[in-house]
């Protein structure tokens, strides 16, 4: 009798494990299209790195191009002109990105203040209006900034109307370029970046806030001592992810706002790669710069992830 019960139990266990494998396989089939998209659009383009090892000329087959090995990489630092240009665009990239990091707490603070609004309708209205600029292209943003701060824009027109002799033109000046671009980026993406923090706030344990209210804590005290500390894990995860993209400052914004007066200060690494490959036709050298950027980004992400694990005890991966 006991042996038959044991056999029945083993059959049930086998059937249960088989059902779990079937369910796991179904879940794998669900994510398979996403894995295929990631492979096609993120990993297959890495084949383009091979151009960095050839002296490629547009219109020619890669098989007919001369293999130069690591010559394009050595030219990054061996050629004085290329080295100077590389250091210049790296300095611009690091400067703008460092200011962006200093402004990173703004979306979190904005989400906190937005969550404190009692009127749900007004809250949704503010959230929508601040999120919409994220979906507007940088070309349109440049037109908007030009109409506001251009030489004949609204701000200068009002200043001249009231008798002011000075003019404000932040688009065609080589002063404070890093700060201006960082502020424009933060303004455009403030509402979009606040969505993650807003979702994290709604998921916080409200019993802690209620207990603090019973103990007589004010709204500012609850924000400083409860809300912000509970949001710090989310902030650190986003910080680590952004460190991995430290050199990926993008191209759209700086291509739209770049001109002859501010090019020395606004040309970041991505724009430099674009100008080399598309503007100057130096495809192989631009790919070499892109490969170097990817390797440095991977090192930075690994360093940030390791530092987070040692400091906070947790890591992203």
Image (cartoon, rainbow, N blue to C red):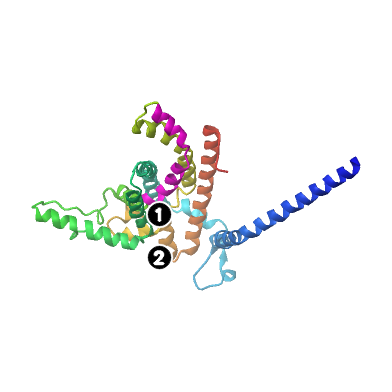
Residue occupying the point 10% across, 52% down: 165
Whether 207 is drawn above or below 88: the answer is: above
247 is within the stretch colored magenta: no
Residue 117 shown left or right of residue 173 in the figure: right
- Residue positioned most to the left: 163
Q: Nearer the viewer, residue 207 or 293?
A: 207
Q: Quadrant of the N terminus?
A: top right
Would you say the magenta stretch is mainly helix, strand or loop? helix
Write the residue at 43% across / 66% down: 278
Which residue is farthest bottom? 59
The boundaries of the magenta stretch are: 190-214
Q: Earlier in the sequence, mark 2 or mark 1?
A: 1
Residue 229: quadrant of the picture = top left
For label 1, the residue is: 81
x%, y% of residue 191?
37, 50
- Hey, which quadrant is residue 54 in on the image? bottom right
Q: Which residue lies at the image location 49% right of the left edge and 42% below the top edge?
A: 237
| Residue 258 can be seen in this image | no
Residue drawn at x 67%, y 58% is 26
Nearer the observer, 229 or 242: 229
Label 1: element kind: helix
Mark 2 Cα within 10 Å, few/some/many (few <14, many 20+)?
Answer: few
Q: Horizontal and vertical percent for residue 302? A: 55, 43
Label 1: few (<14), some or many (≥20) within 10 Å? few
Residue under label 2: 279
């Amino acid at each position: 009798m006991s042996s038959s019960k044991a056999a029945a139990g083993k059959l049930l266990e086998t059937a249960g494990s088989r059902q779990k494998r079937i369910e796991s396989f179904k879940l794998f089939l669900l994510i398979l299209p996403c894995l295929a998209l990631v492979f096609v659009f993120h990993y297959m383009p890495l084949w383009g790195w091979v151009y960095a090892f050839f002296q490629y000329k547009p219109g020619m087959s890669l098989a007919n191009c001369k293999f130069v090995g690591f010559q394009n990489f050595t030219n990054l630092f061996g050629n004085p002109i290329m080295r100077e240009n590389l250091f210049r665009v790296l300095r611009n990239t690091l400067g703008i990105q460092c200011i962006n990091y200093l402004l990173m707490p703004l979306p979190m603070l904005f989400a906190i203040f937005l969550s404190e609004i009692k009127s749900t309708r007004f809250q949704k209205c503010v959230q929508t209006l601040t999120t919409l600029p994220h979906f507007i292209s940088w070309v349109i943003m440049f037109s908007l900034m030009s109409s506001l701060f251009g030489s004949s824009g609204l701000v200068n027109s009002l200043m001249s109307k009231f008798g002011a002799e000075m003019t404000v033109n932040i688009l065609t000046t080589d002063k404070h370029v890093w700060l201006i671009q960082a502020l424009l980026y933060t303004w455009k993406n403030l509402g979009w970046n606040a969505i993650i923090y807003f979702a994290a706030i709604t998921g916080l344990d409200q019993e802690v806030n209620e207990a603090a209210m019973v103990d007589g804590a004010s709204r500012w005290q609850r924000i400083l001592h409860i809300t912000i500390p509970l949001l710090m894990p989310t902030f650190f995860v986003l910080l680590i992810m952004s460190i991995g993209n430290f050199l990926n400052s993008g191209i759209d914004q700086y291509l739209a706002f770049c001109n002859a007066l501010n090019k020395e200060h606004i040309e970041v690494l991505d724009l430099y790669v674009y100008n080399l490959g598309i503007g100057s036709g130096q495809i192989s050298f631009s790919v070499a710069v892109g490969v170097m950027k990817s390797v440095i980004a991977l090192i930075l992400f690994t360093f940030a992830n390791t530092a987070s694990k040692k400091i906070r005890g947790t890591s992203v991966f």
